[in-house]
Amino acid sequence: MANSRFEYVRQFEKEDACLPNCWIVVRIDGRGFHKFSDEHKFEKPNDEGALLLMNKCAECVMNEFKDIVIAYGVSDEYSFVFRKQTTQFSRRASKLMSNLVSLFASCYVFHWKEYINQDVPLKYPPAFDARAVLYPSNQNLRDYLSWRQADCHINNLYNTCFWKLVQEGNCSHAEAEERLKGTLSSDKNELLFSQFHVNYNQLEEFYRKGTILIWKKVDEEIIKLCRSKDSAEETERTVIRTRRKVVHLHTDLIGDEFWQENHEILGSLN
Ligand code: DGT
Ligand code: MG
Ligand code: MG
Protein backbone atom coordinates (compact mmCIF):
# COMPACT_ATOMS: atom_id res chain seq x y z
CA MET A 1 0.00 0.00 0.00
CA ALA A 2 1.28 3.47 -0.87
CA ASN A 3 2.38 5.62 2.02
CA SER A 4 0.32 8.70 2.73
CA ARG A 5 2.03 12.05 2.48
CA PHE A 6 1.67 12.30 6.23
CA GLU A 7 3.79 9.25 6.89
CA TYR A 8 7.02 11.28 7.19
CA VAL A 9 6.01 12.30 10.73
CA ARG A 10 7.09 8.86 11.89
CA GLN A 11 10.67 10.08 11.58
CA PHE A 12 10.06 12.34 14.55
CA GLU A 13 9.70 9.30 16.82
CA LYS A 14 12.78 8.64 18.90
CA GLU A 15 14.48 5.25 19.13
CA ASP A 16 14.70 4.33 22.79
CA ALA A 17 15.77 0.70 22.93
CA CYS A 18 17.72 -0.08 26.12
CA LEU A 19 21.34 -1.11 25.63
CA PRO A 20 21.89 -4.86 25.27
CA ASN A 21 23.39 -6.93 28.10
CA CYS A 22 22.21 -4.61 30.83
CA TRP A 23 19.77 -5.14 33.65
CA ILE A 24 16.72 -2.96 33.05
CA VAL A 25 15.20 -1.56 36.23
CA VAL A 26 11.83 0.16 36.05
CA ARG A 27 10.97 2.02 39.24
CA ILE A 28 7.48 3.34 39.79
CA ASP A 29 6.56 5.77 42.57
CA GLY A 30 3.21 7.14 43.77
CA ARG A 31 2.58 10.76 42.79
CA GLY A 32 1.91 12.99 45.79
CA PHE A 33 1.39 10.05 48.15
CA HIS A 34 2.09 12.27 51.12
CA LYS A 35 -1.30 13.87 50.48
CA PHE A 36 -2.87 10.64 49.14
CA SER A 37 -2.02 8.70 52.32
CA ASP A 38 -3.45 11.48 54.53
CA GLU A 39 -6.63 11.78 52.48
CA HIS A 40 -7.19 8.03 52.71
CA LYS A 41 -6.37 7.83 56.42
CA PHE A 42 -3.41 5.46 56.05
CA GLU A 43 -2.03 4.42 59.43
CA LYS A 44 1.27 6.02 60.39
CA PRO A 45 4.06 5.21 59.95
CA ASN A 46 2.98 2.02 58.13
CA ASP A 47 -0.42 1.02 56.85
CA GLU A 48 -0.51 -2.73 56.45
CA GLY A 49 -3.39 -2.75 53.94
CA ALA A 50 -1.84 -0.03 51.78
CA LEU A 51 1.48 -1.88 51.64
CA LEU A 52 -0.21 -5.21 50.89
CA LEU A 53 -2.10 -3.49 48.08
CA MET A 54 1.22 -2.30 46.59
CA ASN A 55 2.52 -5.88 46.82
CA LYS A 56 -0.60 -7.25 45.13
CA CYS A 57 -0.18 -4.80 42.22
CA ALA A 58 3.50 -5.73 41.88
CA GLU A 59 2.61 -9.44 41.83
CA CYS A 60 0.06 -8.78 39.06
CA VAL A 61 2.78 -6.96 37.09
CA MET A 62 5.18 -9.91 37.50
CA ASN A 63 2.54 -12.41 36.44
CA GLU A 64 2.00 -10.38 33.29
CA PHE A 65 5.70 -9.76 32.56
CA LYS A 66 7.48 -13.03 33.23
CA ASP A 67 10.91 -11.58 32.34
CA ILE A 68 10.93 -9.66 35.62
CA VAL A 69 13.30 -11.70 37.80
CA ILE A 70 13.02 -9.72 41.04
CA ALA A 71 11.00 -6.79 42.34
CA TYR A 72 11.51 -4.75 45.47
CA GLY A 73 8.92 -2.50 47.12
CA VAL A 74 8.83 -0.02 49.97
CA SER A 75 6.46 2.84 50.84
CA ASP A 76 4.84 4.08 47.61
CA GLU A 77 7.52 2.71 45.27
CA TYR A 78 8.35 -0.52 43.47
CA SER A 79 11.41 -1.48 41.43
CA PHE A 80 11.08 -4.16 38.76
CA VAL A 81 14.19 -5.82 37.33
CA PHE A 82 14.02 -7.33 33.83
CA ARG A 83 16.48 -10.09 33.02
CA LYS A 84 19.53 -8.89 31.12
CA GLN A 85 18.61 -10.60 27.87
CA THR A 86 14.94 -9.67 27.81
CA THR A 87 13.45 -8.90 24.41
CA GLN A 88 10.17 -7.65 25.86
CA PHE A 89 8.87 -4.79 23.67
CA SER A 90 12.22 -4.95 21.82
CA ARG A 91 13.68 -3.42 25.02
CA ARG A 92 12.02 -0.07 24.24
CA ALA A 93 12.20 1.98 27.44
CA SER A 94 8.98 3.94 26.87
CA LYS A 95 7.00 0.77 26.12
CA LEU A 96 8.40 -1.02 29.18
CA MET A 97 7.73 1.90 31.52
CA SER A 98 4.30 2.84 30.25
CA ASN A 99 2.97 -0.72 30.17
CA LEU A 100 4.23 -1.46 33.67
CA VAL A 101 3.08 1.72 35.30
CA SER A 102 -0.37 1.74 33.72
CA LEU A 103 -0.98 -1.88 34.72
CA PHE A 104 0.24 -1.12 38.24
CA ALA A 105 -2.04 1.91 38.60
CA SER A 106 -5.12 0.15 37.26
CA CYS A 107 -4.48 -2.81 39.60
CA TYR A 108 -4.21 -0.35 42.49
CA VAL A 109 -7.73 0.89 41.78
CA PHE A 110 -9.08 -2.54 40.81
CA HIS A 111 -7.96 -4.19 44.08
CA TRP A 112 -8.46 -1.18 46.40
CA LYS A 113 -11.57 -2.56 48.13
CA GLU A 114 -9.91 -5.88 48.96
CA TYR A 115 -7.12 -4.21 50.93
CA ILE A 116 -8.33 -0.86 52.25
CA ASN A 117 -10.88 -0.43 55.00
CA GLN A 118 -14.44 -0.41 53.62
CA ASP A 119 -15.07 2.97 55.30
CA VAL A 120 -12.44 4.62 53.11
CA PRO A 121 -13.56 4.81 49.50
CA LEU A 122 -11.07 5.89 46.88
CA LYS A 123 -11.45 9.69 46.76
CA TYR A 124 -9.59 10.38 43.53
CA PRO A 125 -7.56 8.41 40.95
CA PRO A 126 -3.99 7.75 42.08
CA ALA A 127 -1.09 8.20 39.65
CA PHE A 128 2.43 6.78 39.55
CA ASP A 129 5.56 7.94 37.76
CA ALA A 130 8.04 5.57 36.14
CA ARG A 131 11.69 5.64 35.13
CA ALA A 132 13.94 3.08 33.51
CA VAL A 133 17.58 2.80 34.55
CA LEU A 134 20.19 0.42 33.12
CA TYR A 135 22.76 -1.39 35.24
CA PRO A 136 25.58 -3.12 33.35
CA SER A 137 27.02 -5.32 36.10
CA ASN A 138 25.60 -7.65 38.72
CA GLN A 139 27.34 -5.58 41.39
CA ASN A 140 25.64 -2.40 40.10
CA LEU A 141 22.28 -4.14 40.30
CA ARG A 142 22.94 -5.42 43.82
CA ASP A 143 24.07 -1.95 44.89
CA TYR A 144 20.91 -0.44 43.40
CA LEU A 145 18.67 -2.81 45.37
CA SER A 146 20.80 -2.34 48.50
CA TRP A 147 20.38 1.41 48.12
CA ARG A 148 16.59 1.07 48.09
CA GLN A 149 16.60 -1.28 51.10
CA ALA A 150 18.98 0.96 53.06
CA ASP A 151 16.60 3.85 52.29
CA CYS A 152 13.72 1.75 53.61
CA HIS A 153 15.63 1.21 56.86
CA ILE A 154 16.61 4.87 57.31
CA ASN A 155 13.09 6.16 56.62
CA ASN A 156 11.34 3.52 58.66
CA LEU A 157 13.54 4.08 61.71
CA TYR A 158 13.01 7.83 61.47
CA ASN A 159 9.25 7.54 60.90
CA THR A 160 8.84 5.01 63.74
CA CYS A 161 10.54 7.46 66.14
CA PHE A 162 8.69 10.48 64.78
CA TRP A 163 5.23 8.94 65.15
CA LYS A 164 5.99 7.45 68.59
CA LEU A 165 6.97 10.94 69.79
CA VAL A 166 3.80 12.44 68.30
CA GLN A 167 1.32 9.69 69.16
CA GLU A 168 2.62 8.60 72.56
CA GLY A 169 5.16 11.23 73.57
CA ASN A 170 2.84 14.27 73.43
CA CYS A 171 5.11 16.04 70.95
CA SER A 172 3.93 18.34 68.19
CA HIS A 173 5.26 17.59 64.68
CA ALA A 174 7.79 20.42 65.06
CA GLU A 175 8.96 19.18 68.48
CA ALA A 176 9.38 15.61 67.21
CA GLU A 177 11.37 16.89 64.24
CA GLU A 178 13.58 18.97 66.54
CA ARG A 179 14.11 16.01 68.89
CA LEU A 180 15.34 13.85 65.98
CA LYS A 181 17.49 16.47 64.27
CA GLY A 182 21.11 15.30 63.93
CA THR A 183 20.50 11.95 65.66
CA LEU A 184 22.36 8.84 64.58
CA SER A 185 20.77 5.46 64.02
CA SER A 186 22.01 4.33 67.45
CA ASP A 187 20.41 7.39 69.12
CA LYS A 188 17.07 6.56 67.52
CA ASN A 189 17.26 2.91 68.63
CA GLU A 190 18.06 4.12 72.15
CA LEU A 191 15.19 6.64 72.14
CA LEU A 192 12.70 3.96 71.11
CA PHE A 193 13.98 1.59 73.78
CA SER A 194 14.34 3.96 76.72
CA GLN A 195 11.27 6.12 76.14
CA PHE A 196 8.84 3.66 74.55
CA HIS A 197 10.22 0.20 75.49
CA VAL A 198 10.40 -0.72 71.81
CA ASN A 199 13.22 -2.87 70.46
CA TYR A 200 13.39 -1.67 66.85
CA ASN A 201 14.99 -4.89 65.63
CA GLN A 202 12.00 -6.84 66.88
CA LEU A 203 9.45 -4.86 64.87
CA GLU A 204 7.97 -6.64 61.83
CA GLU A 205 10.47 -7.31 59.06
CA PHE A 206 7.68 -6.41 56.63
CA TYR A 207 8.16 -2.76 57.64
CA ARG A 208 11.89 -2.81 58.34
CA LYS A 209 13.01 -4.61 55.17
CA GLY A 210 10.30 -3.90 52.58
CA THR A 211 9.09 -6.63 50.22
CA ILE A 212 11.11 -8.70 47.77
CA LEU A 213 9.21 -10.61 45.08
CA ILE A 214 10.95 -13.47 43.29
CA TRP A 215 9.94 -16.58 41.33
CA LYS A 216 10.13 -19.95 43.11
CA LYS A 217 9.22 -23.41 41.97
CA VAL A 218 6.50 -24.74 44.24
CA ASP A 219 4.76 -28.10 44.35
CA GLU A 220 1.01 -27.85 44.32
CA GLU A 221 -1.54 -30.55 44.90
CA ILE A 222 -4.27 -30.49 42.29
CA ILE A 223 -7.30 -32.71 42.00
CA LYS A 224 -7.75 -34.35 38.60
CA LEU A 225 -10.77 -36.18 37.31
CA CYS A 226 -9.73 -39.53 35.81
CA ARG A 227 -11.79 -42.02 33.87
CA SER A 228 -10.70 -45.66 33.91
CA LYS A 229 -10.54 -47.69 30.67
CA ASP A 230 -13.45 -49.97 31.37
CA SER A 231 -15.80 -47.70 33.24
CA ALA A 232 -17.52 -44.46 32.41
CA GLU A 233 -17.23 -43.40 36.02
CA GLU A 234 -14.86 -40.57 36.88
CA THR A 235 -12.72 -40.69 39.99
CA GLU A 236 -10.81 -37.89 41.68
CA ARG A 237 -7.05 -38.28 41.94
CA THR A 238 -4.60 -35.94 43.68
CA VAL A 239 -1.53 -35.18 41.60
CA ILE A 240 1.49 -32.97 42.31
CA ARG A 241 2.18 -30.22 39.82
CA THR A 242 5.29 -28.05 39.94
CA ARG A 243 4.91 -24.47 38.86
CA ARG A 244 6.70 -21.14 39.12
CA LYS A 245 5.06 -18.79 41.53
CA VAL A 246 5.77 -15.31 42.86
CA VAL A 247 6.81 -15.46 46.52
CA HIS A 248 6.97 -12.53 48.94
CA LEU A 249 10.03 -12.18 51.20
CA HIS A 250 10.92 -9.60 53.83
CA THR A 251 14.58 -10.35 54.35
CA ASP A 252 17.94 -8.65 54.00
CA LEU A 253 19.16 -8.37 50.41
CA ILE A 254 22.25 -6.29 51.15
CA GLY A 255 24.41 -9.19 52.40
CA ASP A 256 25.60 -12.17 50.33
CA GLU A 257 23.28 -14.73 51.91
CA PHE A 258 20.17 -13.75 49.93
CA TRP A 259 22.09 -13.91 46.62
CA GLN A 260 23.67 -17.26 47.45
CA GLU A 261 20.33 -18.75 48.44
CA ASN A 262 18.69 -17.38 45.29
CA HIS A 263 21.63 -17.68 42.89
CA GLU A 264 19.33 -18.20 39.89
CA ILE A 265 18.38 -14.48 39.94
CA LEU A 266 21.82 -13.32 38.82
CA GLY A 267 22.55 -16.63 37.06
CA SER A 268 24.35 -16.67 33.73
CA LEU A 269 21.13 -17.33 31.78
CA ASN A 270 19.67 -14.01 32.78
P1 DGT B 1 6.30 12.45 44.81
O1 DGT B 1 6.71 11.01 44.84
O2 DGT B 1 7.45 13.35 44.54
O3 DGT B 1 5.13 12.74 43.93
O4 DGT B 1 5.81 12.84 46.32
P2 DGT B 1 5.27 11.88 47.47
O5 DGT B 1 4.38 12.71 48.34
O6 DGT B 1 4.67 10.63 46.92
O7 DGT B 1 6.60 11.56 48.30
P3 DGT B 1 7.51 10.26 48.40
O8 DGT B 1 7.27 9.30 47.28
O9 DGT B 1 8.92 10.74 48.59
O10 DGT B 1 7.09 9.64 49.77
C1 DGT B 1 6.04 8.75 49.94
C2 DGT B 1 4.93 9.32 50.81
O11 DGT B 1 3.93 8.32 50.94
C3 DGT B 1 5.39 9.69 52.22
O12 DGT B 1 4.97 11.00 52.52
C4 DGT B 1 4.66 8.76 53.12
C5 DGT B 1 3.54 8.19 52.28
N1 DGT B 1 3.32 6.78 52.60
C6 DGT B 1 3.80 5.71 51.94
N2 DGT B 1 3.43 4.56 52.58
C7 DGT B 1 2.71 4.95 53.65
C8 DGT B 1 2.06 4.24 54.71
O13 DGT B 1 2.05 3.00 54.79
N3 DGT B 1 1.42 4.98 55.67
C9 DGT B 1 1.40 6.34 55.60
N4 DGT B 1 0.76 7.01 56.56
N5 DGT B 1 1.99 7.04 54.63
C10 DGT B 1 2.64 6.34 53.67
MG1 MG C 1 5.83 9.27 45.81
MG1 MG D 1 8.28 7.36 47.29
Image (spheres, rainbow, N blue to C red):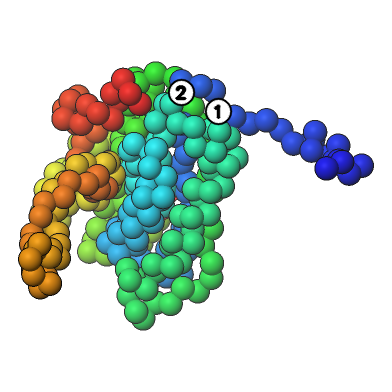
Residues tagged 2 and 1 counted as in contact (Cβ below 8 A): yes
Spot occupied by residue 13 in the image (x, y as percentages of width and height): 74, 36
Mark pair 2, 1: CA separation: 8 Å
Tally of numbered tags: 2
Q: Residue at x 43, y 62 (%)?
A: 108
Residue at the image position 24 percent from the left and 33 percent from the top: 253
Task: Locate the N terminus and report the quarter of the image it occupies.
Answer: top right
Q: Residue 235 at x, y = what percent?
A: 8, 68
- Label 2's element? loop
Identified by mark 1, the residue type is Cys
Say above or below: 250 vs 259: below
Which residue is at 24% across, 28% downward?
264
Q: Residue at x 49, y 32 (%)?
A: 87
Q: Which residue is mark 1?
A: 18
Q: Residue furthest front?
A: 230
Report the front residue among 216 and 174: 216
In this picture, residue 130 sits left or right of residue 57: right
Count residues near mark 2 (Cα–Cα under 10 Å), then give few for <14, some for 14-19, many for 20+. Answer: many
Q: Is residue 25 left or right of residue 259?
A: right
Residue 192 position, x and y percent, is 18, 49
Residue 181 visible, this angle: no
Residue 217 can be seen in this image: yes
The residue at which mark 2 appears reads as 22
| Quadrant of res 232 | bottom left
Looking at the picture, tell me which residue is in the foreground, 182 or 17: 17
Residue 51, position as x, y percentages in the image? 32, 57
- Per the image, label 1 sits on a secondary structure element best described as loop
Q: Quadrant of the C terminus?
A: top left
Q: Is residue 145 above or below residue 31?
A: above
Going by the numbered disc 2, the residue's amino acid type is: Cys
